Amino acid sequence: MKRLHVHVSVKDLPASIRFYRTLFGAEPVVTQPDYAKWMLDDPRVNFAISMNRQPIGVNHLGFQVESDEELRGMRAQLEAADTRMVEENEQPCCYAKSDKYWVTDPTGIAWETFHTLGRIPVYGEDSAVFNHGESTVPVEAPTSGCCVPSQRAQPASCCAK
């Protein structure tokens, strides 16, 4: 079953956590100095906030799926929506490692469809796919630094499952 994913870049994480904690009536399931995430069941959404990564506002939208089979099953649908779909395997981001597909809508909003493989101890890097909504053309992911492997490189040791 899919879960809607919303990721918002914020200026003041503690104030945003207080706001969303009250709005959702729930504590975040992950809290880090630069990131927080709620896994809500009503509505079924993975809502994440982070700071100092991207311009303030909606970072990206997406779908979280529960299995590799469900992720692979969505491939044709995503490619039909955007033939420039980008695939990332074992991508470290948001204190997790995930397999992902990225597409962008005609207005430049990035959509991430992903299956989480496990938690990691670092944030990793936001995917540079579509230059975070500033381009409708896919761009290459960064290739240096801890937890920022190229699409074919082995994950850095800090990204162990």
Image (spheres, rainbow, N blue to C red):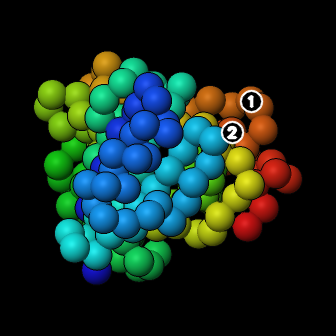
21 or 44: nearer the eye? 21
Q: SS at mark 2?
A: loop
Is residue 140 at least partly visible in the picture?
no
| Farthest right residue in view | 157
- The quadrant of the image that shows the C terminus is bottom right
Please report the residue visible at 63 percent of the width from the left and 41 percent of the height from the top.
33
- Could you tell me the amino acid type at mark 2? Val
Give the labeled residue for mark 2.
148
Q: Residues within 10 Å of mark 2 (few under 14, many from 20)?
A: many
Residue 129 image-quadrant placement? top left
Please report the residue visible at 22 percent of the width from the left and 43 percent of the height from the top.
82
Is residue 15 at least partly visible in the picture?
yes
Q: How far apart are marks 2 and 1 (CA)?
A: 6 Å
Please report the residue visible at 20 percent of the width from the left and 69 percent of the height from the top.
43
Residue 73 point in image, percent of width and height:
31, 73
Q: Are marks 2 and 1 in contact (CB under 8 Å)?
A: yes
Indicate whether 157 appears above or below 117.
Answer: above
67 or 83: nearer the eye? 67
Residue 29 point in image, percent of width and height:
50, 65
- The quadrant of the image that shows the N terminus is bottom left
Indicate whether 137 appears above or below 30.
Answer: above
Q: How crowded is mark 1: few (under 14 residues within 10 Å), some or many (20 or more)?
A: few
User: Taking 27 as reference, is 123 left or right?
Assistant: right
Residue 9 image-quadrant placement? top left
User: Taking 102 as reference, is 124 left or right?
Assistant: right
Residue 159 point in image, percent of width and height:
75, 54
**Number of the label disc, if any, that sits on residue 102:** none
Give the labeled residue for mark 1.
144
Residue 18 point in image, percent of width and height:
40, 47
- Could you tell me the amino acid type at mark 1? Ser
